[in-house]
Amino acid sequence: MIDFQYTGVAADGKPCQGAVRASNAEHARLRLIGQGITPVQIAGVEAAASSDDAPQGRVGTIKRSEVLLFSREMAHLKQANMPLDRALSILKETATSDRLKSFVTLVAEGVRGGKSFYQSLLPFERDLGRQYLVLIRAGESSGSLHVVLKELTLQLEADDKLRNYVVSSMTYPIILLVVAVLSVVLLLAFVVPQFREIFDSMGDALPYPTQVVVGLSDMIRSYWMAIMLGLTVVFFLLSRWGASPSGRMRIDSLLLDLPLIGKIVKNLQFAVYFRTLGNLLQRGVPMVDALRISMDTLSNVALRHDIEPLVGIVKTGKRLSAGFVSRHFNKTSAPQLIRVAEETGQLDSTLIGLADRYEEEGRRTMGRALATLEPLIIIFLGALVAFIIIAILGGVLSINDTI
């Protein structure tokens, strides 16, 4: 653990300073926010490890489905005015997996040891996410933990529904594309060679399409190992380049510029971003911290890079709407709606409404893109297979004409 020296602003607006112990600077910031302090500067000095602040035992990576189950059951139990330690004991008994049972056990031990629910969940930030923890802290501070847990459950369910929609929507086109490639490879590798001896007698007299198909067939049969090795090397190099900061930025930028696909990515990313920001502001999280946490929900690096200046703009005292000047908001009403919401004091509800709008638009655009993509794949596959068959028949007919 590390002792962090901090300066900040207390809940009454007065400056304050002191020390807080945490595993890293971000945990220190969350602890201070949980105490009602808005940190301005945090500096850490390494200290001796403390076993009291670390979870005892080992817990593997907690799945999203387990986090959803935990949140849903906790919301039901807290809504029934169940004491926190009792609710955790019940969840421990009904846990559906050893991993979830270990997680609940460690959280329950923290609560029984005098920690708040938020502090007991803090060691599992990597699995739960900062947004989850900040909302739990806000719910505990306001005495509405059951409401926050219900909202978290609804948000997790919405996120899972969106993720499942994307996966299920892309499954059929991907399968169709794989089948198309395999069909062509099988035709060239096994069907065309059956006519090879017949075509050899014709030599250069074969029609040009037949020569192309026979040449492709020979290349696949003779150099298939080299082709597979080459594709593997290319895939490996592209993945390494894509994992680098510059490569990731380049790929994400190109993705945003693609017709239809770029619009889908932007809409779905903004849906998650605005919903997170709206929920955090609704629970009283300071604007700067809410912007930082919401920015982490953007998986597209290029989009995150465009949104990042918002934190600095708000820090200087300017309005949030002044920062939405990115090209991604051109020809949209989002900046105007946010400006009106700031003037009327309804920023949180407006942001959540924008999230719903972006998600719906993303779904519609994806539906149109898939409705266009599937016939294109089928037409392309049919044309390619037809070309191979016509080339073979053309070769056979040219032999008959010669005879």
Image (tube, rainbow, N blue to C red):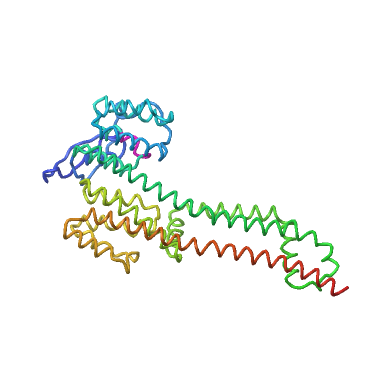
Magenta region, mostly helix, strand or loop? helix
Q: Nearer the viewer, residue 75 or 337?
A: 75
- Residue 125, magenta (yes or no): yes
- Residue 376, magenta (yes or no): no
Q: Is residue 377 left or right of residue 75?
A: right
- The residue at 28%/26% (across/down) is 86
Q: Is residue 72 left or right of residue 233?
A: left
Q: Is residue 276 left or right of residue 400?
A: left
Residue 77 percent across, percent down from the top left: 29, 32
- Vertically, is 63 above or below 272? above
Where on the picture, by quarter, is residue 110? top left
**Quadrant of the frame with the C terminus:** bottom right
**Quadrant of the frame with the N terminus:** top left
- The residue at 32%/68% (across/down) is 330
Q: Is residue 180 left or right of residue 260?
A: right
Residue 109 percent across, percent down from the top left: 31, 25
Instruction: Identify the magenta region.
Output: 121-127
Q: Nearer the viewer, residue 142 or 20?
A: 142
Task: Count how many numbered circles sit on residues in the image.
Answer: 0
- The residue at 63%/58% (across/down) is 181
Where on the picture, by quarter, is residue 180? bottom right
Residue 91 percent across, percent down from the top left: 35, 29
Residue 106 percent across, percent down from the top left: 34, 28
- The residue at 24%/26% (across/down) is 114
- Vertically, is 74 above or below 151? above
Q: Residue furthest front?
A: 80
Where on the picture, by quarter, is residue 202? bottom right
